[in-house]
Amino acid sequence: MTISKNPRMAYGEALVALGKRDPRVVALEADLGKSTQSVLFKAAFPDRHFEMGIAEQNMASTAAGLALAGKIPFIHSFAVFASGRVYDQLRNSVCIPNVNVRICGSSCGLSDFGDGKTHQAVEDVALMRALPNMSVLSPADSIELTAMMEQILDWKGPVYIRVNRNDLPFTFPGDPSYRIGNVVKIRDGADAAIFASGIMVSKALEAAQMLAEKGISTRILNVGTIKPLDRDAVMGFAEGARAIVTAEEHTVIGGLGSAVLEALRGVRHAPVEMIGIHDGFGLSAESYDALLEHFGLTGEAIASAVRKILEEKS
């Protein structure tokens, strides 16, 4: 697969583009500007960039005040801090008044492979999904991330966006009709449906190729918007499949898999298997790929899950 632009760089460039479009856009940083790439916004608009230091809670509260004053604040930190350390402030100052704060959770999932479990957010989607009024985005690559950022100004209420630290394969088709909230079919197939987000979209495509060699036809659905989830689209894409698998770089508790199962409640559907991290934290490793392999976040794991369901049904 072709490697797309690094998501962090794509995010920083997209934020600058938003700043040029709308003077209400401001950026707040928690001493990680070089990692989150908010430094690009700082260079372009130094009077609209606020370095808050290692004080994420203050950053979130300040952003809420700026939003109430008519600004569109983007706050930045590693995903583990942007979701967990500021949870109380996001809940009470951002989500309850339903203000237009955008939260960049950078280095999401296991992508900060060298720093280990303290810096790896594997539960952030569950935390953010549970907050009323919060929307949750998990782009598959820099192309989808840029498409999301182009639309994020007009989105009502707070938004949390996961940004991977590493270069990701290109998977998003760049459909001009794409909108935040869409479930995008990346590949068509009749036997199985794989719902994936983030880097796991590329792993799902690898799985589909493996399965095709065994005569199994698989449709791949990119769920970039985990909340609000398009239930009708999920039900439609699941219809007719004999196996359903969800794949996410996140704990299987409360993330994409849970969201898909919630969407399928009350309707007949195929057995579902969830690929993700099973009730544990991350680890430090020498490479990102080593961590993905360790936790079973691979194309082979997805393909095996599909084959297992189909074999049990036969």
Image (tube, helix red, strand yellow):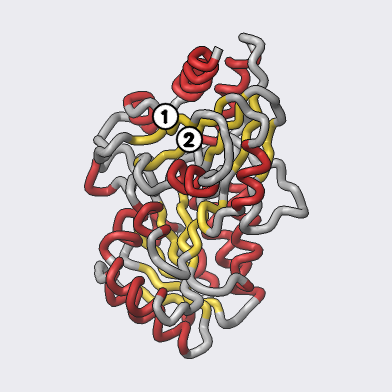
Residue closest to the eye, 271 or 277:
271
- In the image, 42: left or right of 193? left
Above or below 198: residue 24: below
Identity of the amino acid at label 2? Ala
- In the image, 263: left or right of 284? right
For image coordinates 45% across by 25% down, the residue present is: 298
Query: Where is residue 208 shown, x and y percent of the image?
Result: 61, 22
Q: Which residue is mark 1?
A: 297
Query: Where is residue 129 shown, x and y percent of the image?
Result: 42, 58
For image coordinates 45% across by 30% down, the residue present is: 273
Q: Residue furthest bottom?
A: 69
For image coordinates 46% across by 78% down, the residue present is: 98
Above or below 152: residue 242: above
* Residue 176 is at least partly visible in this image: yes
- In the image, 53: left or right of 111? left
* Res 206 label: none
Query: Where is residue 31 shown, x and y percent of the image?
Result: 31, 65
Alpha carbons under labels 2 and 1: distance apart: 8 Å
Identity of the amino acid at label 1? Leu
* Res 247 label: 2
| Element type at mark 1 | loop
Can you say which quadrant of the picture contains the N terminus? Answer: top right
